[in-house]
Amino acid sequence: MNLLRNYEINFVRAVAGDNDIVSGDRIRAASFLRKVLRPDLVKRSIEPPPRSTSGEGLPRPSRRCRWSGFTLIELVLVVTIVGVLASIAIPSFQGMRERAQIVAAISDIAVLSQELTEFELINNRFPNSLAEAGLGGRLDPWGNPYQYLNHEGASNGPKRKDRFLVPVNSDYDLYSMGPDGRSVAAFPAAPSRDDIVRANNGGFIGLASGF
């Protein structure tokens, strides 16, 4: 009986994980009880402990993994900065483009005026149209044809005029209708303010609003 008691005590200590029990005693105790005494204890000693379903004991993701990427505040800040830069850059780009188009129109009118002068030197008169001088179909930077009027034989109505309604040329008018593609005879009128015009018989080429 004492032997049975010792085996049972050693077995319980072995199941409990007592490090003072040598492996041989554990094996002998388990074998004896499997045959004679407590098969339920033997089953529990062999079965592995149940796994936890609560997540305890599992490795936690590192802080670096959990906080990788941009936060909402960072994204909002980036979008705000991009919007501010765009609001500054876009108007500046548009202004530069408009100035470049005006310069191109002024250059075109200067070149056309030179060719009309050459025509007049050869023919002792200015052409009745740009096409007659071989200059038809010329378009300004906004895609509109350049406008030409020979003053010889023309009425006063369509001639380009300053704020005092005095014709600005005595030979011919040559101009671009500008970005809006509209124009009237008088420079101060709203549709004519953005025209690129020739005035003072070629002494002035530029915006009608600047004449």
Image (cartoon, helix red, strand yellow):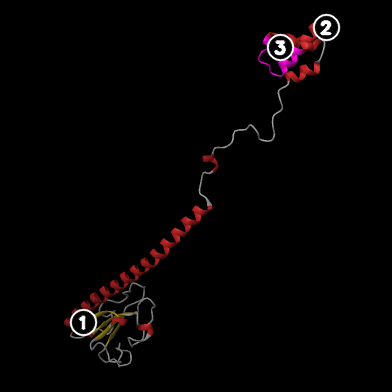
**Image quadrant where residue 187 sits:** bottom left
Name the mark on residue 1: 2
Q: Secondary structure at mark 1?
A: loop
| Residue type highlighted by circle 1 | Gly
Viewport quadrant of the C terminus:
bottom left
Q: Earlier in the sequence, mark 1 or mark 3?
A: 3
**Foreground label between 1 and 3:** 3
The amino acid on which the numbered mark 3 sits, given as a three-letter code, is Arg
Q: Secondary structure at mark 2?
A: loop
Q: Which residue is mark 1?
A: 203
Looking at the image, which is closer to me, 156 or 129?
Answer: 156
Residue of label 3: 26
Relative side of 175 to 45, left or right: left
For residue 73, which numbered disc appears in the image? none
Residue at (28% x, 72% y) in the render: 103
Query: Within 10 angstroms of label 3, few (less than 14), some, or many (20 or more) residues?
Result: some
Q: Which residues are magenta?
A: 9-23
Q: Amino acid at mark 2?
A: Met
Residue 43: percent from the left, percent from the top? 77, 19
Q: Residue furthest left?
A: 121
